[in-house]
Structures are given as C-alpha cells and as structure tokens.
Amino acid sequence: MPPILLLYLIFINFLGFVLYGVDKAKSKGRGRRIPEQVLLWVARLGGGVGCWMGMMLFRHKTKHDRFMALVPLWTVLWAAALVLLARLG
C-alpha cells in the first residue's frame, strides 16, 4: 500500500471516530450538531472503520437503519478495494 494512502486512511478513520464522539456529546447538550450527511460521507470516503468504532463505543446512530447498513457496507467495500489493490500492485 502506498504510504500516502496509508496516511490518508489513518487520518480519515481518526476523523470519523472523533466526529461520532463529538456529535454524541453535542446530542446531549445544546451544541450545534454534525449533519448526518457529513458522518456518512466520512465513512464513504474510507473512514468506515473509525466511524463504526465510534458508533459502537459512543452508542451513537446505532438505532438508525441507514447508518447500521451503510457504514459497514462502505467499510467492506473499502476493504475489498484495498485487497484488490494489494493483489494488483
């Protein structure tokens, strides 16, 4: 795996994890929430593992069918793409 791709994936997954934690904290207070589309896009852009971990650890968005379907789906798709890249590369 190219080092830049590895750094990107580390960053986007860390970002996803943090965003789910921040949004959970804001959901309990009066802070401005992170839009659901932003949370889903981070997973779509490769941060699925971090988003999934944030969902489970913070128990956030786990009752939303859309999140429970799409975040794991994009995680699996990214994993498959990385396996394919490794085999080709």
Image: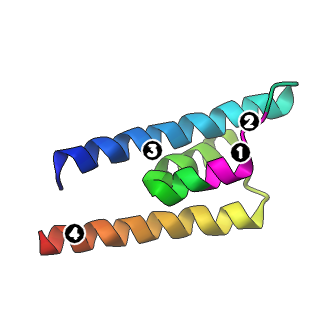
Q: Are marks 2 and 1 in contact (CB under 8 Å)?
A: yes
Q: Nearer the viewer, mark 2 or mark 1?
A: 2
Count residues near mark 1 (Cα–Cα under 10 Å), then give few for <14, some for 14-19, many for 20+: few
User: What secondary structure is found at the residue carrying circle 2?
Assistant: helix
- The residue to which callout 3 is attached is 13
Disc 2 from disc 1: Cα separation: 8 Å
For the view shown, which residue lies furthest in the right direction?
30
Q: Is 34 inside the magenta-drawn segment?
A: yes
Q: State the image coordinates of residue 63 (x, y, percent, origin top left).
A: 79, 58
Q: Residue visible at 35% across and 41% down?
A: 10
Q: Secondary structure at mark 4?
A: helix
**Type of amino acid at the residue the image marks with label 3:** Asn
Above-or-below relation of 8 to 67:
above
Name the residue that disc number 1 marks. 59
Amino acid on which the number 1 mark rests in the picture: Arg
Mark closest to the chain's N terminus, 1 or 3: 3
The magenta region covers 33-40
